[in-house]
Image (cartoon, helix red, strand yellow):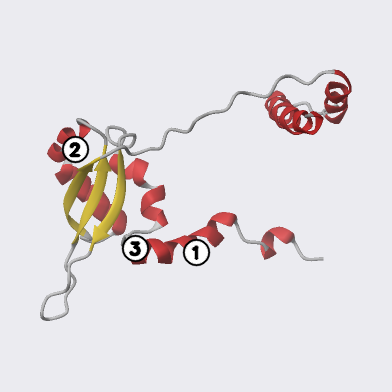
Amino acid sequence: MSNPRKDGKQISELTNGIIDPVLARRAGINSALLGSWDEIAGEDFADCTRPEKIAWARGGDDGSFRPGVLTVACEGARALFLTHAQGELIQRINSFFGFAAVHQLRIVQKPVYQHVKRSRPPPPLKGEAARKLERMMQGLEDEKIRQAIARLGTAVLGKRDR
């Protein structure tokens, strides 16, 4: 019998294979840069910046590679601080790529993250639904897993009652 873990692929591998060509064509970046941005930008700028695209320069007459310009979205007044630290950030970006990929940052002031509107937690279960969930969780010893299953079960069983 074959091992399903060896035959299967992680979802990140599948999505990166789909997303990377689109990002490369539209923005000149890849998901590895986006995924590693927090480490590249450092704690000072990870929460207020996001890479948007790299405008790659055309090669010289001899066909040599020329570094590009990275457009970085930055929130509010932090853009001023980013302007002063852009030399260090360019070095970090080039270290990430392993070659001089970027020679300049173009900083654009705009919101970086969409604020997610959180919904209210579902009301606690009552009656038979609460007893059913409790029976399903019997034998779970890890408290964190119990809490997670309880939240999930409350949401699922609560929707069935409505």
Circle 3/circle 2 CB separation < 8 Å? no
Q: Quadrant of the C terminus?
A: top right
Q: Which residue is mark 3?
A: 26
Residue at image mark 1: 18
What percent of the width, then of the height, locates residue 96? 31, 53
**Relative height, residue 102 to residue 125 (above, below):** below
Secondary element at image label 3: helix
Residue 39: x, y in percent?
A: 35, 42
Mark nearer the N terminus (1 vs 2): 1
The reply, left or right, for residue 56 in relation to residue 11 is left
Q: Would you place residue 116 above or below residue 36 in this image? A: above
Q: Is residue 45 left or right of residue 121?
A: left
Quarter of the figure with the N terminus: bottom right
Which quarter of the figure has residue 37?
A: top left
Nearer to us of marks 1 and 3 is 3
Q: Residue at x 17, y 72 (%)?
A: 58
The residue that disc 2 covers is 82
When the figure is inspected, residue 141 is found, relative to residue 114, above or below; the finding is: above
**Callout 1, which amino acid?**
Ile
What's the distance in space between the residues labelled 1 and 3, CA to CA?
13 Å
| Residue pictured at 78% horizontal, 21% vertical | 125
Q: Position of residue 27 (x, y in %)?
A: 32, 60
Q: Residue furthest left?
A: 61
| Residue located at (16% from left, 75% from top) | 64
Give whichever of 158, 27 is nearer the camera: 158
* Spot occupied by residue 122 in the image (x, y as percentages of width and height): 68, 24
The residue type indicated by label 3 comes to Arg
Q: Earlier in the sequence, mark 1 or mark 3?
A: 1
The local secondary structure at tag 2 comes to helix
Could you tell me which secondary element the residue under label 1 belongs to?
helix
